[in-house]
Amino acid sequence: MVVSLEKNRPREVVIIGGGFGGLYTAKALAGANVNVTLIDKRNFHLFQPLLYQVATGTLSPADISSPLRSVFRKSKNTRVLLGEVKDINPTTQQVILNDQIVPYDTLVVATGANHSYFGKDNWKEFAPGLKTVEDAIEMRRKIFSAFEAAEKETDPEKRRALLTFVIVGGGPTGVELAGAIAELAYKTLREDFRHINTSEAKILLLQGGERILPFMSPELSQAAAEALQKLGVLIQTQTRVTDIANDIVTFKKSDQVQELRAKTILWAAGVQASPMAKVLAEKTGVECDRVGRVMVEPDLTVNGYKNIFVIGDLANFSHQTGQPLPGVAPVAKQQGEYVAGLIQLRMQGRSLPKFHYSDVGSLAMIGQNLAVVDLGFLKLTGFLAWVFWLLIHIYFLIEFDTKIVVIIQWAWNYLTRNRRSRLITGREAFLETPDVDTNTPYESPETKQTVKV
Amino acid sequence: MVVSLEKNRPREVVIIGGGFGGLYTAKALAGANVNVTLIDKRNFHLFQPLLYQVATGTLSPADISSPLRSVFRKSKNTRVLLGEVKDINPTTQQVILNDQIVPYDTLVVATGANHSYFGKDNWKEFAPGLKTVEDAIEMRRKIFSAFEAAEKETDPEKRRALLTFVIVGGGPTGVELAGAIAELAYKTLREDFRHINTSEAKILLLQGGERILPFMSPELSQAAAEALQKLGVLIQTQTRVTDIANDIVTFKKSDQVQELRAKTILWAAGVQASPMAKVLAEKTGVECDRVGRVMVEPDLTVNGYKNIFVIGDLANFSHQTGQPLPGVAPVAKQQGEYVAGLIQLRMQGRSLPKFHYSDVGSLAMIGQNLAVVDLGFLKLTGFLAWVFWLLIHIYFLIEFDTKIVVIIQWAWNYLTRNRRSRLITGREAFLETPDVDTNTPYESPETKQTVKV
C-alpha cells in the first residue's frame, strides 16, 4: 500500500458523507494544498440533533439543513459530488459510485449510522425512526394525523389509542421526542380542538435500561425523568419491547408482559452502522463490532490502510476508554478535524499522536425552560440548562450557515407557545385518516395500571 | 327550498375549502351567532401566491402555511374538520364527507381551482404545475436536480437540455417562476458548481397570447418583459405548446413548429375549477363555464338555492364587467366577507345589494428589486414596485398568523442573495440523477435561433 508523496501534484482527498464528520474534515481542508471531493447522496447537510423539532412541528427541514454547495462555495479546492457510493477499491484507490469512478489518494469514510430494529424489520412500518428529513416529515404526519383522527373518532377505545403515543428508547432522541409531544398535547394544541381534550393524551417513554439518558450522571437522569414526568410523560424503565404490530406495542417489564394499544409508536432505540462498514470490511478485512461499526486504529485509519480513515458514527474508537466513543456530533467533529490535520502534516512527511477525544459533555432538551446538561465539571438542569442548550445549538447551527431564522423561530415559539410547522404533508395521507384495528384480541390490565401511573 | 328563520337556534354555516375565500368567510363569521364548520382536506391554509418561492428554494412550506386550527383557535364558534367532501345534498341540506355527514343551514363552497392541461393530461408527468405544497417540493426537486445532473453530465447536448428550463404560461406564476429561476442560475448558484457555468442555462417563457401578464396594462406587460429579458429570460409570445414528451417541448409560433430539448418543463398555463363544481351542477342544475366554474347569481348564490354560496376561483361572477372576475386572492377575500355579512344580515331578515368587487389592482414579482404593480390609478415598476410587492404580501401573510420568519428570511436572502431552502427531498430522486433521452430524433434549427434570441 503506497501513499505517493510527490510534492507537485495536490493530493486527492475523497470524503464520503456530508454529516458532521465529513463536513468538518472538508472544512478543515479548505485552502489546503489538496483537492477535496465530498460525496453525499443528498445535496444538503442535515443537523440531525434538531430533527426531532421538525418531527414535532417546531422547525422546517430547511431550518436545520445547509446546502452543501453553499457551505463550500468559497472553498475552491472542494467539489461536492451528489451520488451514492456502491463500492470502494483500496488497491486501485478508487471510489465506485452509481454513475462514475472517483480516484483518491486519501479516503475518509463518514457515512454514519441508521436505526436498527434489532432484526425485527417488520416493526419499521409501525414504528418509524428519525434519521432523515423524510423520516421527520413522516413522523410529523403521523403525530398530527393522530390528533385529527381522534377529533373525529366517536369510539372511546379507538380514541384512546389515537391519543396514545409510545416512544421506544430513552436516549436523547427519545427524551426530546417525548418532551416535545407532551408539550404539544398538554400545552400547544389544548385549545385547538373542539371534541377532544388533548390533555387526555398518554405519552409513554419505554427504556430498556435502568434509567433514561444512561450516558449522563445518575442525578441528571433522575432530574430529566422528573422533568418529563412533570410534563406528563409516563416513563417505563427496564422495559423491553417484544413486539410491535397492528397498533399494539407489547413490552416486558420484570417478566410481566404488557400490551398497549397505540396508534403512534416512534422508534428511538437502536442504531447500526451504515452499509459502507460492510464494504470496508470486505475490501480491507477490517473488523466491525456488534452494531457494524468499523474498529479503527488509534489514528482513525483502517488497519493496514494508512490512507483510509473512518470517523463519526461509523467508527468504533475504543483506544481511549476501552469503550467506543458515543455517536454524537462533537466526536465526529473532533475526528474530522484530526484527520484533516493529519493529512496535511503527512504531506510534510510528519504525523500526529493518536486521536484523543476531549469530552465536551452531553445535553438533552426536555421542554420549554427544561433541559439537562452534563459537562462533567458542571451539571445543569432546568432553565439554565435550557438556555445553555439553546446557545450550544445556535453556535453549532451558525457555524456553516447563518440560521438566524431558527433563532427567530425559537424565540417566536417561545413567546407564542405555538408550533407553526405542523403541516400534514407527503403522501396524500391526510385523507385516509388513520383508523385503529380493535379486532385484535387484547388483554391488558397491567397496562391500565401502567398508564395510570 | 326553505331557509328556516327561528332566532333561537344558531345557524349551521358549513364552509368547504380553507383557501382565501373560505378562510375570510369563517374569519368574518367569528363571534357571530352561527356555528361555523370549516372543512378542508389539509390541516393548513396555503398562501398560494408565494408557492413559487417554495418551488425555487427561497421559503419553506411552513413559511407560507397557517395551521387552520391555530388560525381559529380563539373563534369558539368555529370548528375545523379535516376531510374530503364527496357529495352534497341540497334537499336534505347535507354535506357528505368520506367518513361522515354534516348538515347545514347555509353552505359556502370555496374549493378553488386546479391546473388544466387542456385535455392533454399525459403532459402532466413531464410538466408539473404549482398548486399544492407537494407540487412545489416536486418542482424544487426537479429544478435543483437538473443543475446537479448537469454538473455531472459530460455530453454537451444532454448538458444543454439539463440546463434548459421552459415555463409554459405568461401569467403571474409563470413570470414569477421564470424570474426566480433566472436569478438562481445567473446569480445565486453561479459560484456553487465546479464543472458547469450556470450562466449558460436557458430559461424560456412561453406565452400563448400577445403579451405576458395580459391582465395588466400594455406598458406594464412591456416593462415586465424587459425586466425579465434583462434577467436573461427568453420570452416567446403568441406561442402555443403543441406537445410535451420525452424531455422535448414542441411549440408553434406563427405556423412555425419548433422543438426544444429541455429537462425541466414547468406548467403555469391553464386552470380549471375543482371537481366540486360538477357536483354542484349535478345537484342544483347550476350552469358552469368553459373551465368548469360555477355561474353564480349577483349575490354569489347558486340559482334557486339562496343558502348555497360559491366564491373564489370556483365561481364565475360576470355581473360586474360582463367578464368573469380574475382568480386572485382579493376577489376571494371580498366575496368571503360579502357572504359572511349577508349571512348575518339575513338572520335579521335583512339583505345586501349585489356583490361588487372593488379592484385593488394586480402585481407580479420579477426578481430582486424588480416587480410590476398596476393599481389602475398608479403604475409602478422596478424597485418601488418591488417594495410595494413585499409590503402587500407581508400585510396579507401576517393577517392570519405572524409570519415574522418570512420577513427575516426575505431580508436575509436579499442581503446574502442566497437560497437556503433548496433541498432536494421527497421520493429518493436525488439518486436517479435525471438523464436526457437523446435518442428521440429531433430537428430544430429554429429553436437554436430562438434560444439565441
Image (cartoon, coloured by chain):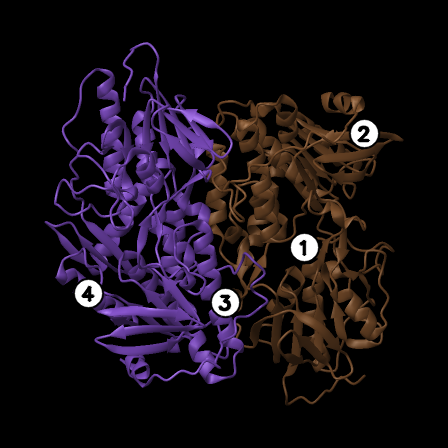
Chain colours: A brown, B purple
Marker disc for residue B384: none
Query: How packed is label 3: few (under 14 Cα within 10 Å), some, or many (20 or more)?
Result: many
* Residue type indicated by callout 3: Ser
x and y percentages locating residue B424 in the rendered image: 52, 61
Instruction: Report which residue position mark 4 lands on.
Output: B211
Q: CA distance from mark 3 to mark 1?
A: 28 Å
Quadrant containing the C terminus of chain A in the rendered view? top right
Q: CA distance from mark 3 to mark 2?
A: 48 Å
Marker disc for residue A329: 1
Residue at (51, 48) in percent of width and height = A60
* Residue type indicated by callout 2: Gln
* Residue type indicated by callout 1: Ala
Q: Quadrant of residue A43?
A: bottom right
Marker disc for residue B145: 3
Instruction: Report which residue position mark 2 lands on.
Output: A258
User: Under tag 1, what secondary structure?
Assistant: helix
A291, above or below B237, in the image = above
Q: Chain of mark 3?
A: B
Front: mark 1 or 4: 4
Q: Is residue A288 left or right of residue B66?
A: right
